[in-house]
Amino acid sequence: MLMPRSWPPPPALSPDLSQQPLAGLPGATLEVAAAVDGVAERAAGLLLQALEAGGPVGLATGRTMQPVYAALRRQVAQWSESRCQRLLSRWCSFNLDEYVGLGAADRGSFAAEMAAALAVPLGLAPGCLQLPDGLAADPDVEARRYGAAVATAGGIALQLLGLGSNGHVGFNEPPCPRHAPSRCLELSPATRHQNAAAFGADPAAVPERAITLGTAEILAAREVLLVVTGGAKAEILRRSLQESPEPGVPASWLQTHPCLRVLVDADAASALRLS
């Protein structure tokens, strides 16, 4: 786990964002935006702040993150050249996961998605944006190597997370213990169905296995930023944050994190109980 250090205050809330008290979870910060655009701009600002500070940042993929990375690109495009160069020179990120059997040349891989979203448009140098190697000869060995690489880098300063429809974070499928390590695992039918859009809408085309950072690495991050949008995630978000933590909802372990920021749109927040 990263050693405690001073951290700059987060960017000021924009007028379309409000901070709400979350019943049963007083240590967490809940920020609600009226719409997805507000969530994306706020998440991008928080990511850029962490990246400029120079600590390793944990990144995620999926439909929720697409507007976040688009907002990040827009914000960086408004910076001075010197500030952009400082960002690129300090950039250090680790993605949560990758499909087994897919590499950067495969359109459905997370490596390809991150290249299109960030690496190519920002001009990131090779090695700045790291992912598990989905083409590794032994995925179990690769999972251990990847977890060790995160630890060697000092752990994650800010971990960005989405939320799966079955409560998974990263590819930590239920049931998942609180301190599961980085590993290779089987993907559930629910997750393969959720991710089918990148594979011609065919769940059977989604790889059966993936390498993921575990809940151990996620919970060791200094800060966690959980980003959730859309009414379809409202109930699983409520279960994750306002029911007792348990292996059947891996995201519920986030309740135990000392520095959790939850950033949602109004639809995703609709089932939450506020203090």
Image: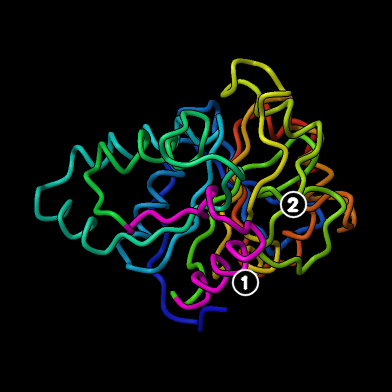
Residue type, numbered disc 1? Ala
Between 228 and 87, the one nearer to me in the picture: 87
Eyeballing the image, is 152 above or below 228? Answer: below
Work out how far the residue at label 1 is from the one at label 2, CA to CA, in angstroms.
20 Å
Q: Quadrant of residue 127?
A: bottom left
In the shown orientation, is residue 246 left or right of residue 195? right
Q: Is residue 76 left or right of residue 5?
A: left
Question: What residue is disc 2 on?
Answer: 185
Residue type, label 2:
Leu
Residue at coordinates 67% horizontally, 61% vertically from top-left? 140
- Element type at marker 2? strand
State the residue position of label 1: 220
Q: Residue visible at 47% across and 78% down?
A: 152
| Left or right of 242, for residue 56 | left
Q: Residue at x 75, y 32 (%)?
A: 234
Q: Which residues are magenta?
A: 127-152
Of the pair 61 and 157, the residue shown nearer to us: 61
Above or below 274: residue 33: above
Circle nearer the viewer, 1 or 2 = 2
